[in-house]
Image (tube, coloured by chain):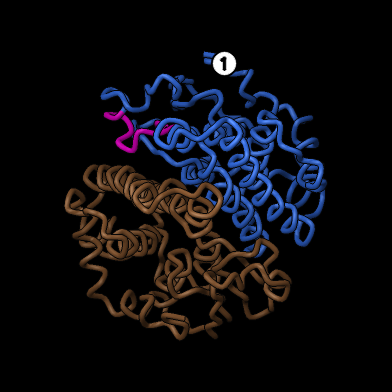
Chain colours: A brown, B blue
Amino acid sequence: MQLYSFYNSSTSYRVRIALALKGLSVDYQGVNLRAGEQRQNDYRALNPAAGVPLLVDDEGNGLGQSLAIIDYLEALHPEPPLLPAEPLLRARALELANLIACDIHPVNNLRVRNYLANELSLSEDQQERWYRHWIAEGLAAAEALLVRHGFGDYCFGDAPTVADCCLVPQVANGIRMNCDLTPYSRVMAVYQHCQRQPAFQQAAPDQQPDFAS
Amino acid sequence: MQLYSFYNSSTSYRVRIALALKGLSVDYQGVNLRAGEQRQNDYRALNPAAGVPLLVDDEGNGLGQSLAIIDYLEALHPEPPLLPAEPLLRARALELANLIACDIHPVNNLRVRNYLANELSLSEDQQERWYRHWIAEGLAAAEALLVRHGFGDYCFGDAPTVADCCLVPQVANGIRMNCDLTPYSRVMAVYQHCQRQPAFQQAAPDQQPDFAS
């Protein structure tokens, strides 16, 4: 399989964690989002939606969207499971994963930040306040869900799920952007536990072939 | 089951379509997002993430996030399936659903538009250009995926999937906001087919008890 990824893309990072947890190796293809490589014609031929990550399976099928890719990996390589078998626990893992994937990440991603800077000419201060506002609102919601429903060392139990695959890159973004994360103690405890695991370490931005490109 | 929903929330609309397709009835509870009811303490006690939709199952478990709810409904009530059994087709349905849920909808939802208007004091014209920019970029990607992978009357075949549950509310938003949707002919053909089906009609905003509240 091939993975088209940008080292600093948190949606790519989610898929890298899932691959590492499942012990799957892929041919890594860097796509430099800052240079706009995702919008070039040769990349659009692979992914008409022009984003990363993109997984190309053994039969040459290209699939985008991190949560769709993780679900597909789960179908092809069920062990270890990243989606719990018990329906309510599975629902809790997907609830938190989607909270991050839909309510936090999209509003702060690179294309939106580019629009704020270039089309709306926001000041540096306005851009930072924008970023921190959505991190604070979103992680407060994640913390509240974890306090109510979480247990164990990971988000939901003693094994990682799709929720952890999403949580770690989102927290890493918050750290990188100097957000105050001290109010989210359960979120941070899970993050720190994950960061001690080899699969999460292996998936980190600074371990990728295109790091700092 | 109970569904906490706002008639005009497109994430609530996705779940209403899924419920109607599965022939499930729920006790409908309107939550007025424009009046901020989702942030009141009694609602936070139900959903600490303070959003809609929220499904409360027969055992009193409250679950947020539209795609997590649809996946949970699929586990509890598998027929008719909204996630195809064949892995690649399932992946295609989730890819398009997530494109809409992560790349299009969040950037244009009510809380972001409130921030643009109230915190950033954007002009009406800037707000409209923002909205149309993300609709145009996102629906162009959806169209490209459907042209490449779609078939049949719905997004992926002759039966509705989670992709159709997401597509219809997103197109409805574009129509409501007077976006030019003529470039997305495959998207619009699917939308028009869905709009002729009773389940989709029943789930529409103007059929809800809190319509125009």
Give the x, y percent position of residue B146: 75, 55
User: In the displayed structure, does residue A190 sit left or right of residue A113?
Assistant: left
Q: How many marks?
A: 1
The image shows residue A60, relative to residue B83, as above or below, that is below
The quadrant in which the N terminus of chain B is found is top left
- At horizontal 59% and vertical 69% (from top left) the residue drawn is A36
**Classed neighbour count for the residue bearing mark 1: other residues with Cα under 10 Å, few (<14), some (14–19), many (≥20):** some
The image shows residue A1, relative to residue A113, as above or below, that is below
The answer to which image quadrant residue A37 occupies is bottom right
Give the x, y percent position of residue B201: 70, 25
- At horizontal 25% and vertical 50% (from top left) the residue drawn is A150
Instruction: Compare residues A201 and A138 and report the one nearer the observer.
Output: A138
Q: Which residue is mark 1?
A: B211
User: In the displayed structure, does residue A199 sit left or right of residue B22?
Assistant: left
Q: Which residues are magenta?
A: B44-57
Instruction: Compare residues A16 and B198 and report the one nearer the observer.
Output: A16
Q: Residue type at mark 1?
A: Phe
The answer to which image quadrant residue A161 occupies is bottom left
**Disc 1: which chain?**
B
The image shows residue A7, relative to residue A10, as above or below, that is below
Q: Is residue B192 magenta?
A: no
Instruction: Compare residues B190 and B141 and report the one nearer the observer.
Output: B141
- At horizontal 45% and vertical 32% (from top left) the residue drawn is B114
Can I make out residue A34 in this image? yes
Give the x, y percent position of residue B117: 47, 31
User: In the displayed structure, does residue A120 sit left or right of residue A163?
Assistant: right
- At horizontal 50% and vertical 24% (from top left) the residue drawn is B6
Can I make out residue B81 in this image? no
Kind of element beneath mark 1? loop
Give the x, y percent position of residue B79: 61, 42
